[in-house]
Image (cartoon, rainbow, N blue to C red):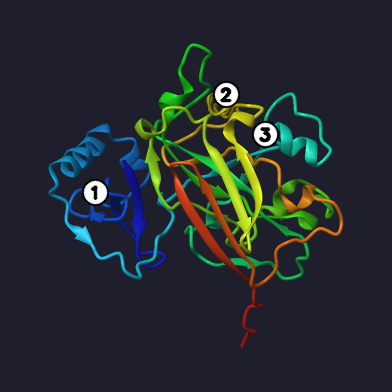
Amino acid sequence: MKLLRVGVAGAERPALLDQDGTTLRDLTGLVADIDGDLLADAFALDRIRAAAGAGVLPALDAEGIRVGPPVARIGKVVCIGLNYHDHAAEVGAEPPPEPVVFLKAADTVVGPYDTVLVPRGSTKTDWEVELAVVIGRTARFLSDAEDPLSYVAGYTIGHDVSEREFQLERGGTWDKGKNCETFNPLGPWLVTTDEVPDPQALSLRLWVNGELKQDGTTAGQIFPVRELVRYVSRFMTLYPGDVINTGTPAGVALGRPEPREFLRAGDVVELEVEGLGRQRQVLEDAKAPPAAG
């Protein structure tokens, strides 16, 4: 299934993309939202499948409707750095011996077509197309005997927007360059695992102003999805609805020769992951808050 959420920000409604790839079906008669509670409820998911198969779900008028993030009330976004051999090479880093883990706040998540804001003072805002994993079962310290992929509800596209000066030149951890407002477009759909038989066989591409910048495959990951879920579960509990951004392939601005062209207001970024849809964002400058008083 391809599950999504549509409507104005903060008031999205659950929907399903029909098998024809164009028709939206309304799920509000079956479920309250697409969130961790739903993803952990196999019976509720089966009801959606049955209704979709029976052709009884009402159609939604998709004209002009906003698509929001495909998961509501995300608890945490866990990110993996330097997880592609070619990306590590392009930035001059050795492949890490263990996954590089950092967090993005859930409030960085926006819809796949929402505006991305270039932070005030930014000169090095960068792009990163990523396969995003959505957790469907609580995972705590998974053993080697357990199948980590059985804890996955589905997959979607994550755009791990990054400000490289904030991330690498301002001291401390990477957090300052990863948690700016709007820095994690997600979606358009949550594609359930039955439609993604092998998460290590997906192509990823990203364009800036129509120019192809990234063209990779998840086969190039240093640590595959299976290992990432197991590894992260040994350091933090993964709950239904949590997201893991699994890293980006080569082609980011940071890895290009000088003079590097980072993102600026007016740029258009488009990205896709095979079978998971496509995103498009127009960048704008973040505005200063209104004066007090």
Residue beneath disc 1 = 31
x%, y% of residue 263? 70, 63
Marks 2 and 3, how far apart in space?
Answer: 12 Å
x%, y% of residue 213? 67, 51
Instruction: Indicate which disc residue 83 carries.
Output: 3
Given the image, on which type of amino acid does mark 3 rest? Asn
* For residue 215, above or below residue 60: above
Task: Tell me which label, 1 or 3, sits earlier in the chain.
Answer: 1
Task: Tell me which label, 2 or 3, sits earlier in the chain.
Answer: 3
> Which image quadrant: the C terminus?
bottom right
* For residue 247, above or below residue 31: above
Q: Helix, strand, or loop for circle 2?
A: helix
Q: Residue furthest top?
A: 145
* For residue 148, above or below residue 73: above
Given the image, on which type of amino acid does mark 2 rest? Glu
x%, y% of residue 162? 69, 54
Mark in front: 2 vs 1:
2
Instruction: Indicate which disc residue 16 carries.
Output: none
Q: Helix, strand, or loop for circle 1?
A: loop
Residue beneath disc 2 = 227
Labels 2 & 1 near each other (Cβ < 8 A): no
Mark in front: 1 vs 3:
3
The crowding category of the residue bearing disc 1, from other C-alpha atoms within 10 Å (few below 14, some 14 to 19, many at least 20), is: some
Residue at 49% of width from left, 25% of height from top? 140
Q: Residue furthest bottom?
A: 293
The crowding category of the residue bearing disc 3, from other C-alpha atoms within 10 Å (few below 14, some 14 to 19, many at least 20), is: many
